Amino acid sequence: MTRHSPKIGVYGFTGCAGDQLMILNCEDQLVDLFGATEIRSFVMAKSDNHEGELDVAFIEGSISTEEQLKRLKEIRERSKVMIAIGTCACHGGPQSMKLGENKFDEMYKKVYGNAKIAISKAFEAQPIDAFVKVDMYIPGCPIDKAEFLGAVTKLVAGRHPYLLKAPVCLECRWKENPCILYSGKFCGGPLTKAGCGAICPSMNLPCVGCWGPTDDLNASSEYNLLKEKGYRSEEIIQKMKKFGGAKMAKLVAEFDKKEAKA
Amino acid sequence: MKKMCVVLDEREVQDNPFKPEMFRIVRRYPLTSDVNFFQARPMDVDEALKFNYLPGQFIMLSVVGEGEAPFCISSSPTRPGLLEFCIRNVGTLTSSLSNLKENQTIGIRGPYGNGFPMDKLEGKDIMIVAGGLGVAPLRSLLLNILDDRDKFGKVTYMYGARTPELMLFRDEFMRFKERDDINCLLAVEKDESGTWKDKFGMVTSLFKDLGPIDAKNTVAVVCGPPVMYKFVMEHVVKLGIPKHQILMTLERRMKCGIGKCGHCAIEYLYTCIDGPVFSWWDVLHMKELIGRGASDKTFA
Amino acid sequence: MMILKMKKEDLSTFLDSIREWGELWGPVKKGDKCTYAKVDSLSQMDLKATRTIIPPKKFLYPPRFTMFDYDEEGYVERLGDVPKRILFGIHPCDLHGVLIMDKLFLEKYNDPYYRERREKTLFLGHSCIPDDKCMCFATNTDFIAEGFDLFFTDLKMFYLVWVGSTKGHDLVRMRPELFSRELDKNDILNYTEYRKWKNAQFKAQVDFTGMPDIFELAYTSPIWDQLAEKCLSCGQCSMVCPTCNCYNVTDEVELGALEGTRDRFWDSCMFREYSLVAGGSNFRDKRADRLRLWYTHKLQAFIGEFGKPACVGCGRCVSTCPVDINVVTVSNALKELEVGK
Amino acid sequence: MRELNVESLARVEGDGGITVTLDGKKVKSVTLDIHEGPRLIEQLVKGMKPEDDITVIPRICAICTLSHRYSALRGLEKALGVVPPEKAQMTRELMMLGENVESNSLHTFMLALPDFLGYPSAIAMLNDYPDDVKRALRLKKFGNHVMAVTSGRIVHGENPIIGGFGKYPTKKALEEIRLKSHELVPDAVRDVELFASLEYPAYPEEDMVFMSVNAPKKQYGFAGDSILISNGKESDVEDYKKLTNERVVSHSFAKRSLYHDKPFTVGANARMINMGKRLDGQAKDLFKEHYSERWLMNPLFNNLAQAIEMLWSLEHMPDVCDQLASMDDPPNAQPTRQTGTGTGAVEAPRGTLYHHYEIKDGLIEVADIITPTAQNLDDIEKHMKVTAERMLAEGKSDDEVRLKLEMVARAYDPCISCATHLVELRRI
Ligand SMILES: Cc1cc2nc3c(=O)[nH]c(=O)nc-3n(C[C@H](O)[C@H](O)[C@H](O)COP(=O)(O)OP(=O)(O)OC[C@H]3O[C@@H](n4cnc5c(N)ncnc54)[C@H](O)[C@@H]3O)c2cc1C
Ligand code: SF4
Ligand code: SF4
Ligand code: SF4
């Protein structure tokens, strides 16, 4: 990582373009950002895009077609550092909430019937680290301006970004919200990586988990708790998997199996 | 009523203990592929001579824009003016540090920690057992002892490294072998380059070459990776050295170095202010000092 | 100790008149809970509330703040921008909590950030109405003799006002006519009555005697693993506990320059990252190890060192942990060797 | 046979390209290809509770996140028999105004304007047009701010929920918006003047049909229960399927819509054409001044329409804020039934957005979403085709043709990521 003007590329795959949009939403820093870095490719923001060697590639979105996969690998080859931005790239995003349930073909048929779509073969969306090595993750649906800029400014300075690993509850307590989970209702806070500032609980709403799973979570305990509180199994699992992607799919499969045995 | 509260206003305002002072890197070179040697001194030369410390103490080192981490001082207080460190490149701060060049600045505050009780070591036979990066604090102790040689009894130094290339300060220690006021025992586990002319094996294998010791008058000082302690301690205890005369330095995550951030707490002790030097007796009844907690039955 | 008497209806006037000293803060409703918030007058406060979500430590040691501004030349501390505050309505347990924080932050090395806020904050204590989660009777923190500037005990018609510091006394002197020194037999009777009444309120089933030994005996107990199966590692217990002080530090950088801020923020030993050291080794990788550290710290280690637990019995962990792990359930589980429902 | 390609269409949201196929001198076809992968969102929400649906659905598109949320809320609330309190409705109105300012300023300045002025990006324009770029960023930031205050954050805010809001904006926040929106009106006026001064090439001109919602009370607005068509017809939103027959094409994961077998247009220009008479304030005067018959033929005027609309949104905010500030926070309305159907329609900045739901026993059975870009795609291709034909006939260079085609596509402000929306296939 060079200290001066790192060469940067921003790429979008399957997702809502929200993370790229968040970059454009850094109105106050945008001009400096373009000044401090050499943005070689950022299709959503500009049209003179030159590919080639990159210091940092920011990847948004999950991978769901052969075409994308090819492109992702090609970008990886010419990037020193690859950073997944947004929950889709980091974990798969909402489009991979049914990972592990083998429902993709069925759903695909329902939507497209037997119509032939020539451009590329599609498959169930997966996070980018299912295919390439990822050096850093900046999750969020969409990413948080401050968290993203905090990381980028460090990269530009030749330093290492620091992102909170703790769950949303940490920031939720800083905001001093009454705990939703304590009151017996679902809240994804304990399962979800902090970084957003606990926006949702601060509005009296449960965290829906949009930052994706945190480093060290106890999904089965929350599952048991909510069952005790009268939630249906399917509903809890649906809620957990909404933004939980590949990691949560695995955890849920584990305690699902345990439950089936018991 | 015991005491009035909030009499803080009357207290003398101390300097901000969290504030790093800027130091200049004077020399810097690699000791092995991932360990760097650093010499640094305060920007202000007068300050340099005032910086006083004990072997075994550590400082909090800041790399601008990266953060802070604790490192033992490897130089000896008997040679004031310059601070020396040997630092392994393992993570974020250490890798940024390894990119710094001579004449660039770092922040330093300290020294912190109890350090080795030098006054209590006087008159004692000293046995030093080092493994891997454990050399960092032990070199400070060793150099200090050698500079004040007549204050101490017999001195034994044992150091094991995996290969000759991984032996830190190898040339320096090889020269000690030629001195007769210190018994310097070095071993490597393997040597692919074929340059090693000395003993082979783990550091524990050196115990058989120790010769007779006066256990009751010996202080053993051990430092190395956590796994090393278990094996080395067995040998040291077998020699009959009292448990409170076996010292070791420990590593914990630290964010402040002065007992505020809590990270290094073990029961009621803080590694930073109550340590990092502990005795084997401390360890035996404070299981978490080197054990790994509830799952670890070593000390049960 | 100076004890004065004040008519109940004068409190509002008194608070209005001392506001020139600094911002007035007091307990205010938040959802079905309560928090210390900035207020304009007594009428906005909820003095019946038993406990706030976060204890007053947030004033002395905010969840996140900047310690230094730095650039390549060095570090410049950021001190001096803290407003003066009067906190009204602090209960005895929380004042005990502040005393423990004082010990941690002002002894040995003196933390200037804590110190500044401590000096600029006046603590006006208030008697409380214990609920079924309070256990200050078991930690000997149900009454307080130090650590406050003023302390108001509500005796229905009157307040008895303890003056605990010179600053507290200065406040009194702002409206001396509101206070009387004439205390009579009735006041003593009322006060004893109040203490009796308060003692009778405690319902929590908890007894911390012998805890240090029990912890030692239960070091390898399977209880820790059973608790760990439930623990969410959400860290809420640490955030709400008045005696948890742990923090983390991070450096923020400005875009395109080597300058920025060094920030400090609340951390919890319940997080895996907390004890991680270089090389990936973690002394408390397992949740059970971390839980044991937390409770050992509260109920064993501190007693060993200071003769009293680091728990002040405020009941916040009881009213916060979604899976019911708290000083009551843990100490009972250790004694009875089974995790209660 | 020869192909003229724009591999990645830049400055649009999402991943798409343009392919022009030439047969000798004749343009055989022009297609807007969508490379975005399929997400099957409507399938994913099946079986979910409505409360979970509204957290997933906005993720279809970051730019119209609030339109998606609002449209879903309208559909779901109809299905569940929820009548949101007046304050909730009004707060939603405010949030739509915010999204409109944000999205229109982003599109007009950052995405479309560089074409007209011959720059690769807005940032590249900074040296020569610093005031214009900074003004745009100011407006966009304010739009974002309004979205954040009303919905909880800039993108994908979770605050608007069924029956109301998690937390209503504070009086202080409303007051800030009121003052700031007022202050920004001159900026927006200048934008209108700038876009009115641009030259709109005539290549793409062709007859068009426009559709938009019919905002209630004969006012201009972004939500309604019926659809206006520029041919004078009006249709209930529940009949949305008749208006927007969908089909799958082979070059894209996005579906297409036709009205009476013909392409049609949705977006700011459609709204202006259908509801322009209802505008008020300076927006009304400027619309009158700059409107011409060419608007009915040339999609490029959508850029100007967006600028005028942004002005209207700003002018409208103080009034909404005042009304909101005078209302107390009501409790959220609750469902009165657990089974039912409902269709919501709102005007996203880039056109009409439909959300149709069928709910059984509290769980979603069918979700059907029709996005503006899906409706516009055929229209875009139609206008690109005439543009290519005319330009090639005039012997224009490939590069020139490419640029103009991109301009036409971009004028629609296509949101390609949301065009990947997927619905159950109904063959006609
Ligand atoms: C009292 C004391 C004295 C010390 N003295 C010295 C000394 O003299 N010399 C010295 O070199 N160190 C010393 N240390 C250790 C030193 O503090 C750490 O190496 C340093 O904090 C690492 O900081 P960092 O920012 O580079 O690592 P961080 O980025 O904080 O990395 C720490 C974490 O990153 C992960 N990590 C990083 N690298 C690896 C890896 N290679 N494999 C697996 N995981 C990895 C681990 O999870 C690790 O816990 C001492 C520590 C203490 C407490
Ligand atoms: S409300 Fe949610 S995020 Fe907040 S503390 Fe409770 S569980 Fe955690
Ligand atoms: S609280 Fe949860 S759902 Fe809300 S923004 Fe944060 S991570 Fe996302
Ligand atoms: S341990 Fe629980 S009861 Fe004790 S002081 Fe902390 S939060 Fe309060």
Image (cartoon, grey):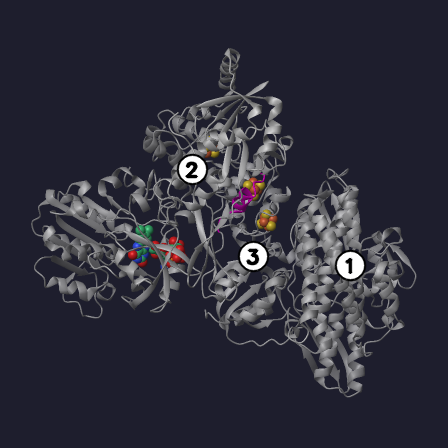
Q: Secondary structure at mark 2?
A: helix
Q: Secondary structure at mark 1?
A: loop
Residue D217 vertical position relative to residue C176 in the rendered view, above or below? below
In this picture, which residue range is highlighted in magenta? A165-179
Q: Is residue C40 left or right of residue C96?
A: right
B36 or B14, nearer to the observer: B14
Q: Residue at x 68, y 43 (%)?
A: D167
Kindly tell me whether residue B91 is visible in this rendering: no
Rendered image: mark on residue C101: 2
Quarter containing the C terminus of chain B? top left
Residue under label 1: D426
Residue under label 3: A146
Label 2 close to label 3 by CB (< 8 Å)? no
Q: Chain of mark 2?
A: C
Residue C319 vertical position relative to residue C111 in the rendered view, above or below? above
CB at disc 2 and ligand 4 closer than 8 Å: no
Q: Chain of mark 3?
A: A
Q: Chain of mark 1?
A: D
Q: Amino acid at mark 3?
A: Ala
* Position in image of residue B74 (x %, y %): 25, 58
Q: Secondary structure at mark 3?
A: helix
